[in-house]
Image (tube, rainbow, N blue to C red):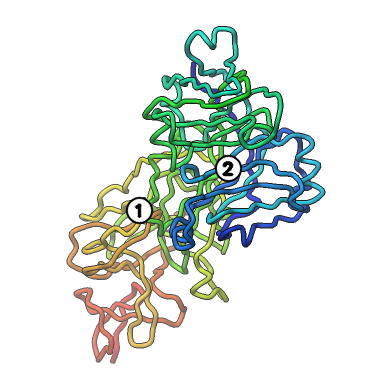
Amino acid sequence: MAAVSVSAKQTAIFKGVKATGSWASHLSLDASKFANLSAGDVLSVKWTNDTEGAEAAGEDWIQITVCDGIWSTKLIDSGDAKFIKSLTFTLTAAQVTAIKANGLAVGGHFVNITDVVIGDAYAASDVEHWDGEAWSTGNFVMPSGWASTQLNNDNLKNANIGDCITVSFTHEGGIGEWAAQLQIVNADGWTNLIAIPAGTSTSLSLMVDESNYAVITAGDVRLNGCNLTITGVQLQTTDMYYALNHTAADVDLSKLPTTTSVNIDLTRKIDWNTTICVPFDVDDPYTAFGHEGAFYSLKEYNSGLVFTPASTLEAGKPYYATFNMDGINEEDKTMTFSFDAVTINTTLTPSAEMSGLTMKGNYTPGISMTDKYGVACVNHGGSWDWAFYKGGTGTTLNAFSAYIEGTLSSARLDIVIDDETTGVQELKNARTEELKSYYDLMGRRVAQPAKGLYVVNGKKVVIK
């Protein structure tokens, strides 16, 4: 059976980095952020381990705890979190009441908290994983000692990042750390993917993420526990949030689901002139990117790169774009753009070859731009000139951008906008209207033109 594809809307309550030491600090989230929270909603927390900080302090324990805002109610505690990077669980009515009254506190022992996300309840799939005689009665009893059972990997191997393995159970007795406990471990039976005292809940969810994806999809997963009865194990899918960072060296689109819609935050720099290529369709890029953005696809090469306006962006196709950057400082040009319920398509589709030139999209951070053309602004004698310039040795391009590849000898290519609706062509090679770039009839730029015939902004001009 295949997992049911569901759409569970997720809302980011916190994104950033909150570093914690030896319980010296925590992330405090105000109750107003949870006004719309309901029983059954999902709460997810993600973090990275501060291993170096722990070692420097002589510690060997990594831990994270989620409580209501006054630390009076422990919602969930990771135990030793060396092997996990996220917690995902479903909130009870009592927990929601406490959070709405007091907010949320996320504390850590040498962790860097990066995300706190809430959302609609996960819809259960029709996939249940259990093996062996013990499951024949519909449950598996883990006695006061310890017991273990192996999950069938036939369906888990098809899990995608963002999916959740949810274990439902009942328990009797204490809430203490060892009185009732459940562990989800890898095939060796000991390396924890998640280990949580079970006394505060009747279900436990492990989100499939970058840290555990290979283990979950490649080998059998086991459940270890004591003093509880497991009533079901399900694989659930959701459109969990993903972040694509155009400068990150570890961007791996192959890990994103291609059949389930996801919410994407794309972080990258925009400028007056730039290029864009994204792995999903954007129906209304003008609204999505804002800043008076305009988007163009390559039409032809005719004494310059001729672009024509595009009303939508197609996944994997390269585009030239312009934005209004008036009043925006250089350090503020790196922005985050959100896209909800998009479907990932990692296929790159270059433009048709024209006069030996092809425009190609790029998803790899830091690719070499040697002998490739990228859009850039170059200062010529005090005037700023936007065009496509051939990259030299050591030049690179970030992900989710595009470049021109070809065999022309020219180091610079003009940008020409061909508006097919009006029949007007406009040369877009400058930041300011008053910029004039002079070229001789061989196409060579002339910084200080003397008498003669030149090409200026696509027109022939005679200097007498």
The total of numbered circles placed on residues is 2
Q: Give the quarter of the image for residue 436.
A: bottom left
Picture coordinates of residue 211, whole percent (x, y): 44, 42
Asked if residue 171 lies left or right of residue 135, the reply is right
Residue type at mark 2 is Ser
Task: Kindly identify the residue that appears in the image at 47 percent across and 48 percent down.
Answer: 313
Which label number is shown at residue 78? 2
Q: Within 10 Å of the Cα at label 1, are there few (<14), some (14-19), or many (20+) other Cα atoms?
A: some
Q: Is residue 424 above or below residue 463?
A: above
Picture coordinates of residue 218, whole percent (x, y): 37, 29
Q: Nearer the viewer, mark 1 or mark 2?
A: 2
Which label number is shown at residue 198? none
In primary-sequence order, the first of circles 1 and 2 is: 2
Task: Kindly identify the residue that appears in the image at 50 percent across and 59 percent down.
Answer: 294
Which label number is shown at residue 299? 1
Q: Is residue 249 above or below residue 444?
A: above
Picture coordinates of residue 159, whole percent (x, y): 46, 29
Quarter of the picture containing the C terminus is bottom left
Q: CA distance from mark 1 to mark 2?
A: 55 Å
Q: In this view of the protein, which residue sits in the foreground, 158 or 165? A: 165
Residue type at mark 1 is Lys
Task: Kindly identify the residue that appears in the image at 55 percent across and 73 percent down.
Answer: 328
Picture coordinates of residue 236, whole percent (x, y): 56, 28
Disc 2 is placed on an element classified as: loop
Q: Give the quarter of the image for residue 172.
A: top right
Q: In this view of the protein, which residue sits in the foreground, 250 or 377? A: 250
